[in-house]
């Protein structure tokens, strides 16, 4: 998975507005290290809706 650089530059965590990091997976996802939350990426598009969010274990 490779997010488009323009998309990556404007994306932020919907909770804390922190920077999101790409995780190659499986499954591929974007993660917020501040909030410890993750969202799946499908066909290069982050699915950043509440139903798709999952907590990360510290």
Image (cartoon, rainbow, N blue to C red):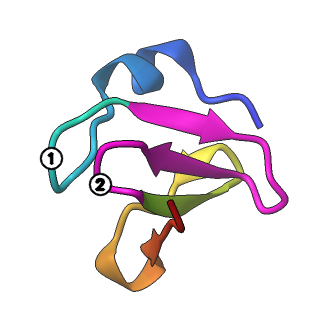
User: Which residue occupies the foreground of this view, 30 or 58?
Assistant: 58
The extreme bottom residue here reads 51
The image quadrant where one finds the N terminus is top right
Name which of mark 1 and mark 2 comes first in the sequence: 1
Q: Is residue 8 above or below residue 33?
A: above
Instruction: Label 1: state its secondary structure.
Output: loop
Mark sitting on residue 48: none
Q: Residues within 10 Å of mark 1 (few under 14, many from 20)?
A: few
In whole angstroms, how far apart are the C-alphas of marks 1 and 2? Answer: 7 Å
Tell me the magenta residue range: 20-36
Instruction: Label 2: state its secondary structure.
Output: loop
Q: Is residue 35 magenta?
A: yes
Residue 24 position, x and y percent, is 78, 42
> Mark 1 highlights which residue?
16
Q: Residue at x 29, y 54 (%)?
A: 35
Mark sitting on residue 35: 2
Q: CB under 8 Å between callouts 1 and 2?
A: yes
Residue 26 position, x and y percent, is 84, 59
Q: Residues within 10 Å of mark 2 (few under 14, many from 20)?
A: some
Q: Is residue 52 above or below residue 12?
A: below
Q: Residue at x 61, y 29 (%)?
A: 3
């Amino acid at each position: 998975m490779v997010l488009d650089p323009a998309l990556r530059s404007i994306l932020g965590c919907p909770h804390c507005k922190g920077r999101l990091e790409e995780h190659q997976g499986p499954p591929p996802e974007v993660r917020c290290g501040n909030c410890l939350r993750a969202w799946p990426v499908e066909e290069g598009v982050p699915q950043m809706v509440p139903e798709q969010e999952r907590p990360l274990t510290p």
